[in-house]
Amino acid sequence: MKVHFYALMAMSLITTQINADEPATDPAENADEIVVTSSILNPSRILNPLYVIDGDEIENNATTSLGEAVDGYLGVSIADYGAAVGQPIIRGMSGPRVKILKNGLVNRDVSGLGADHLNDIDLNDLQQVEIIKGPSSLLYANGTSGGIINVVDNCIAPEDFTTQEFIAGLETQSVNDGDSQFFNYKDNLNGFNVNVGYKKSEFGNFDIPNDAIMHEEDHEGHDEHEGEEELSYIENSDLEIESTKFGISRAGEWGYFGISVDNHESMYGIPYHGEHSDEEGHDDHDEHEGEDDHEGEDEHEGERIFSTTDQESFTIKGLYNVNGNLINSVTYNYRDTDYSLIEAHAEEEGHDEHEDEEHEEHAPTVFSNDATEYGAIFDLSNDNFIQKIALNFVDEDSSIAGEEAFMNPANNEEFTIGYFVSADLDMFYLDAGFRLDQIDRTGSVTDEDHGDIDNYSIDDTTNSFALSLGRDLSDTLDVNFGFASVERLPSVIELFMNGPHLATGRLETGNPNLQSETSNNFDITFNYESGDFFAYASFYVNDVDNYITLQDELDGHDDHDDDDHGDDHGDEHGDDDDHGDEHGDDDHDDHDEFANLIHADYVQEDAEFRGYEFEFGRTFRLGSGDLRLSFGRDDVNAEFTDGHNVPRINPARNIYSLSYVENDWVFKLSLKDVERQDDIGEGETVTDSYQMLNTRLTKTFDISGAGDLKVSIFGSNLLDEAARNHSSFVKKQVPLAGRNYGAKFVYNF
């Protein structure tokens, strides 16, 4: 009923204004997140839903993860694992269904191998961040049933720099006692465009609101942590990042050619880790003790658990203007990426090792991903059509070695042919994309009972296509219909996972026999612009055949009996505490060390995602500036065909926005009202509602004509809400950060 109410409200606001007399204005003036130019296609009009976030929006706000930077945009949310990790979600689609691109090429980190792995990408000195769904996304990545997020910094400049530019900046934040320093230099030296950048950020453990920590009661109703001092911060939630990049290019009428080298290093604490039992003595605990241990007690107390990452990439990119009868130009690229993530354990400073002699030395776990990618895009456009054909090849090796080596080494090879066409056909606008991928994924699974290794080679072809048709219904209103069928081959972790994954608190098992996942999505979008009034509404249905999910093994009783208790006494894992007992004598006997973990399997079942997004607002002339007010809402519901809910789907959100721009002043205020999520999957618990109030004031000062100084003062979670993200595996143990104030100073000369 709620969906119909909001849909009717949005449509009535659009139709009542359809005959307004005021002339239409440029949408970019009213909605700063809707822009018609995308760096990866550059057509004059893109029909499928598209956000382009200007680089200044990222630069002027607090330094955050990529997911948090885009979390306030309709249809986009986040799966967090503390402040360092924020993996984006688009319309309920997450993980390998959303691809992160760096300057048009997929960023080859190991974020897909763990919920506690960050999207390791540099957000310094950006031109823009593009969020794209639909036909154009098929040209640049496969399996993108959610879409792509392309981070653009143009380290390899496609055009000559006309002026010298040096930018230096400082930033401070209160919630983590953190700071950042960065600089960027751009110039044309003897015909060569040079782009150099550096950024270093150091953030400590982040503060949380009072009473944000949730404790479990024992079986007699007592709080097992009663009398303990409440922490005002999350341990092991610190983050350090250091990024450097260097690009050089040569441009002319013939096109451009350039190379870039970048290095991105980080070290961040893992604020929660699943427990494993004493291998020799776990059976001595009685049933109640085992349950109490599992109810949120992190066995690694007293230990510092952290990850260090190191990503080095070498890129060649260019464009050659052929100016032939058939081919206008060829864009070509090559990238070699070496990526590693090392997860390690260490005693925390001041911890008495004699009090904790039972802790064993933990060998580090090394996640690595080495990838080589090269391809070309041929522009066949003419006066009537924008046409592009893409060829691409990827060779990628993934491995996990060490104590938590829950997947044997795997290889992924992909060869792609893609086609995109866009045209104005008078009656309507057309966008269409087609993609054919030949994929070979090889890996192995170790039989824990006998030590045998079973080798697998999955060699398959996937086909995807998308179509968008748009039409102007009037001078102020247009409509767009979209259909996409995207086929995705299971990822290596879904195929070959076989062991304890402590970040999710689960003993996970993949399935080499999983079938391709096919997403069939239909959406309809309305855009309205008349004078100072604007409105947008989009509705979609996404039927996913063979949807792949990590399903907790259940013990047969109704997991939802306790749903009404919500998060007051619930655990993310619900009643899954009994899994250790249920499976203690089954096929997982060789994993006795991890008997307290939840047993979970990658399984397939048809699912349907239904949702909508809408926004409406108005711009008012106030003084010598413009005041813009808007209200937006998004919601997605996801169910399997048997009626139960898809897990970790974020709830509906209402977003209220206010902005005022006057000369060199910019003021922004937003309230994100996140509703209670009680449409929960198996093993989940209800997540309470919360409100997130954020603000920013930016002033630009002219420094005697030699440059400018930009000062931004920002605040987030001003209400100091104890908030939890429903999509997080650790929502109970790791709430969102508390109230944060900060300032950023950027000098450009």
Image: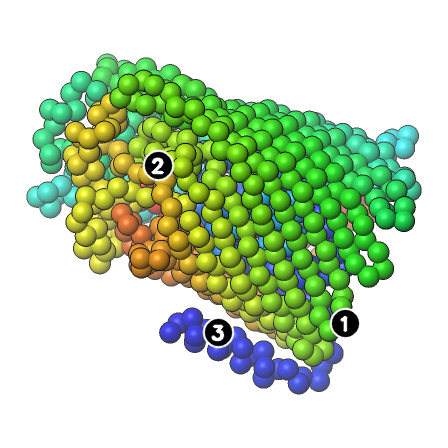
Q: Please name the amino acid that badge 3 sits on.
A: Ala
Q: Please name the amino acid that badge 2 sits on.
A: Thr
The part of the image, by quadrant, that contains residue 252 is top right
Compared with 666, 372 (above or below) is: above
Nearer-N-terminus badge (2/3):
3
Q: Is residue 473 visible?
A: yes
User: In front here: 272 or 424?
Assistant: 424
Quarter of the image where the N terminus is located:
bottom left
Alpha carbon distance from label 2 to label 3:
37 Å
Circle 1 is placed at which residue position? 426
The part of the image, by quadrant, that contains residue 43 is bottom right
Q: Which mark is residue 7?
A: 3
Q: Secondary structure at mark 1?
A: loop
Alpha carbon distance from label 3 to label 1:
29 Å
Residue drawn at (78%, 44%) of the image: 378
Residue drawn at (29%, 42%) of the image: 552
Is 227 left, or right, of 9 in this rendering?
left
Q: Secondary structure at mark 3?
A: helix
Q: Please name the amino acid that badge 1 sits on.
A: Asp
